[in-house]
Image (cartoon, rainbow, N blue to C red):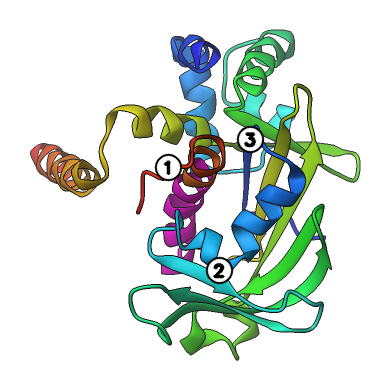
Amino acid sequence: MSKPSFVYVTYIHATAEKVWDGITDPAMAAQYWGCHRNVSDWKAGSKWEHERTDQPGVVDIVGKVIESDRPRRLVMTWANPANAADPEKVSRVTIDVEPHKDNAVKVTVTHSELESDSDMLRGISKGWPVVLSALKSFLETGKSSLV
Amino acid sequence: MDKVFKALADETRRQLLDRLHADNGQTLGQLCAHLAMTRQAVTKHLVLLEEANLVVTVRRGREKLHYLNPVPINEIAERWIGKFERHRLQALSELKQKLESEDE
């Protein structure tokens, strides 16, 4: 197992199912994920696409679903569509949702196999903290700071 | 949020976060190597950083790796920074970095 590049954690007062749906349901992601939604049937082996909500059909990230165990664990590959065929440029995202105390869940996003010093690495290291904060405020307050 | 401010209000703990920012996923031994402190003291600081969710740990075999988790800092930023200000503030901060590095 290679060493993960980044590990992001947030605690959210919501059910694990709500967190899962917040990430995988296009209609929910569209409400907080900075004008993007994630489209897939979320079955292992299926493709998934990170699509713009204001320009349907424009896809900024693509990948394959590797493991899908609602609501606990989602593993997927992650690449710029132009680089999706180059294994060096395909990274991997694991999202774990675990029960925590006080009716909260712990959400851990582990991003590994990122190409060092790449635009993708810089992009995701700015993006995940913003998206996870937005997911938290969206699920807890119904509002997002991004949309 | 109190825990985050408390954890950040210490030069050594900020240094530990800087070290993880430069090289994410380090063991306690690696983090200690560049600090003139005992392992026990570094461990105490790391516990406070973990309690504030600014550092998260991942087990890999026998190793425990420490990662910088900037999500709580972003949550603080979101409380006071509006969505339209974010880009302007980023531009200002980039300008400051650029001008200050030219002075050196």
Residue designated by label 3: A12
User: Which residues are drawn in magenta?
Assistant: A117-133
- Is the residue at mark 3 from the same chain as the one at mark 2? yes
Q: Are marks 3 and 2 in contact (CB under 8 Å)?
A: no
Left or right, residue A74 beside residue B48: right
Confirm whether the magenta stretch covers residue A121: yes
Q: Position of residue A52 (x, y in %)?
A: 41, 74
Circle 1 residues within 10 Å: few <14, some 14–19, many ≥20: some
Find the distance from the CA under tag 3 to the CA under tag 1: 14 Å
> The disc labelled 2 sits on which kind of residue?
Pro
Q: Is residue A17 left or right of residue A128?
A: right
Read off the residue under disc 2.
A26
Front residue of B39/B54: it is B54
Q: What is the quadrant of the C terminus of chain A in the image?
A: bottom left
Residue under label 1: A143
Secondary element at tag 2? helix
User: What subunit carries mark 2?
Assistant: A
Instruction: Look at the picture and state if A131 lies above or below A143.
Output: below
Q: CA distance from mark 2 to mark 1?
A: 16 Å
Is residue A81 placed above or below B63 in the rendered structure? below
Please report, as a chain letter, where disc 1 is located. A
